[in-house]
Amino acid sequence: MLNYGLDMSALDGGFALPGLVAEGDELDALVSAHPDWTRPTPAAGWTIAHQIAHLASADENVVIAVRDPEGFDAVLERAAAAGARYADLDAAAGAAVPRQELLERWRAGRAEAAAALRDVSPDHGFPWFGSRLTSALMTPLRLMETWAHGQDVFDALGASRRPTDRLREVAALGVTGRELSFGAAGLPVPAEPFRVELTSPSGPTWAWGPQDAPQRVLGTALDFCLRVTRRRSRAETGLRAVGADADRWLDVARVFL
């Protein structure tokens, strides 16, 4: 389950709704062309159907949280009852329905989620798992999760995936997740500032942090996003660290628990 208790100060505040819609459409084009959703993905025990069911459920939960905040209490109660197995059990239940039914459910859910986020102001607050969010923050978070689970499906099918500048939202969340990364690993959060410089898919460099920061992470945006979403090991990327703390960050980097 995603952890949204992140320091969002590194986000540029851009409302990523068109990117979220495009990310879902890209994954839809891939999975709708493949009839066998029982193929296993890199996530242990999860097939393609599990991945789509997970995304469908999350989108439906967004609609409830935004449009019926009091009704979201029932979602939280179900999650609490299932504990650490919530995501697995929820995905398994969705994966058990016929493929076409699940596909239609996911399409309807993500359209409703996009509409719900579009219909409220960016600073509109609503409950979520263990926190409160705004629509301006939920949008890039949904984009990130759609992209990350989509990567599992692309990997399962051995399909090539062209990176786009939609990755900026994912990379920004990765930057904000630095404290989460150290905390989840049981390590103290470094006091020194960090500089992150990533080559975007379209060519320009995306940068966060002071230019003279002693701790630096350098590489491509794609590699960084694959690393912070735990879709690739550090050794599978070309990321480079300058400074002991930056080096340690790449070992433990994540954007969710």
Image: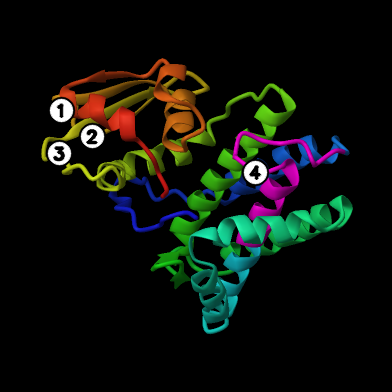
Q: How many marks?
A: 4
Q: Which residue is mark 2?
A: 209
Residue 211 to residue 193: above or below: above
Q: Secondary structure at mark 2?
A: loop
C-alpha gap between disc 2 and disc 4: 38 Å
Tell me where residue 87 appears, x and y as whole percent: 57, 57
**Amino acid residing under circle 1:** Ala
**Amino acid residing under circle 4:** Gly
**Amino acid residing under circle 2:** Gly
Residue at 65%, 43% in the rendered image: 45
Residue at 25%, 47% in the rendered image: 183
Q: Earlier in the sequence, mark 3 or mark 2?
A: 3
C-alpha gap between disc 3 and disc 1: 12 Å
Disc 4 to disc 3: CB gap under 8 Å: no
Quick check: 210 left or right of 201? left
Is residue 114 visible in the rendered structure shown here? Answer: no
**Amino acid residing under circle 3:** Pro
Tell me where residue 13 appears, x and y as whole percent: 39, 50
C-alpha gap between disc 3 and disc 2: 14 Å
Span colored in magenta: 36-58
Q: Earlier in the sequence, mark 2 or mark 4?
A: 4
Quick check: 116 left or right of 121? right
Residue 213's mark? 1
Tell me where residue 91 appears, x and y as whole percent: 66, 56
Q: Which residue is mark 4?
A: 45
From the viewer's perspective, is the residue at label 2 or at label 4 nearer?
Answer: 4
C-alpha gap between disc 2 and disc 1: 7 Å
